[in-house]
Image (cartoon, helix red, strand yellow):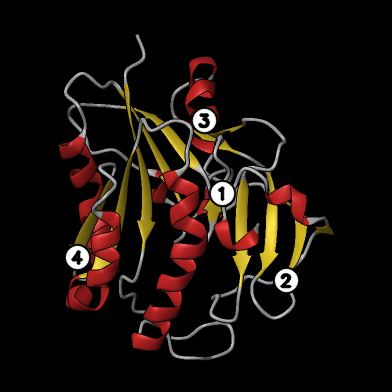
Amino acid sequence: MLMYDHFIITRFNLKKDDWKSDKNSEKILDPLWLSERIELFKNYCLPSVVHQRSKNFKWLIFFEKSTKDEVLDLLELMKQYSFIEAVFLNGYKEFQLNLPKLLKGKMKSSSNSLLTTRLDNDDAIHENFIEEIQNSIEFIPENSIVQFPYGICLQHRKSKRLAIQYYPLNQFLTLFEKVDPSKDPLTVLGKEHTMWKEEGWNIHDVRNELRWLQVVHERNMLNSFNGTPVLKKHLKGFNLENEK
């Protein structure tokens, strides 16, 4: 019988040696960047996860330990949701080293499989996202990447625009892996999201409906607005209060 744990993994502001500036060469991870990122998180990411139809998951959000005082208000907001846990580390390298062991320690002893889902702190997921992933794994082999290849691109602020994107191996992937008690899990963060196909992993498309929202804004690292323009009605199911 398939028994699994499911974790959403979000890196919030972990320091990374090669991540110094955004696409406009503006400094990142400073107090201004952090305050703007918290606003995006509250407007898009948080409400989309809170309103998931399936609550059978744990959301781990990773913060830089040195900025704990700067995110106190956000931590208070998160405390009302039992499935959200804040984790504080010293930089991205510590995250890479500790994530597999940390997840293994949080798994139920009865679980024989693990689901790990990537989610950036400025993006959002449809309310059916988690439920449809969990339903799909009954019919696919373990050690598979589970994805929704279609989603929405939203241009934030300036002149808001929406577009449908076809983007396989996107930043909303889930890894469905078999648990080996003698080893640490790989996790979906074990490889860059664009590299799974090159490594020969099975790639499973859940369905072609729009199940993720990529938010394009001035402080992105690389993202830019593109796709086939669509109307605002396509945001239904993302539970974004500011977009109604």
Q: Are marks 4 and 2 in contact (CB under 8 Å)?
A: no
Residue at 34% x, 86% y: name it.
31
Q: Amino acid at mark 1?
A: Asn
Q: Residues within 10 Å of mark 3 (few under 14, many from 20)?
A: many
First of labels 3, 4 by sequence position: 4
The residue where tag 2 is placed is 160
Nearer the observer, 190 or 38: 38
Q: Residues within 10 Å of mark 1 (few under 14, many from 20)?
A: many
Answer yes or no: is residue 18 visible.
Answer: no
The residue where tag 4 is placed is 89
First of labels 2, 3 by sequence position: 3
Residue at 42% x, 46% y: name it.
50
First of labels 1, 4 by sequence position: 4
First of labels 2, 1 by sequence position: 2
Which element type, helix, strand or loop, lies under badge 2?
loop
Residue at 53% x, 59% y: name it.
123
Q: Are marks 2 and 1 in contact (CB under 8 Å)?
A: no
Q: Amino acid at mark 2?
A: Lys
Q: Amino acid at mark 3?
A: Ile
Of marks 2 and 3, the one in the foreground: 2
First of labels 3, 1 by sequence position: 3
The residue where tag 1 is placed is 239
> Residue 113 sits in which quadrant?
top left
Q: Amino acid at mark 4?
A: Leu
How far separated are the C-alphas under marks 2 and 1?
17 Å
How far separated are the C-alphas under marks 4 and 2?
35 Å
How far separated are the C-alphas under marks 2 and 3?
29 Å
Quarter occupied by the C terminus: bottom right
Measured as percent of width and height from the top left, residue 82 is found at 25, 42
The residue where tag 3 is placed is 133
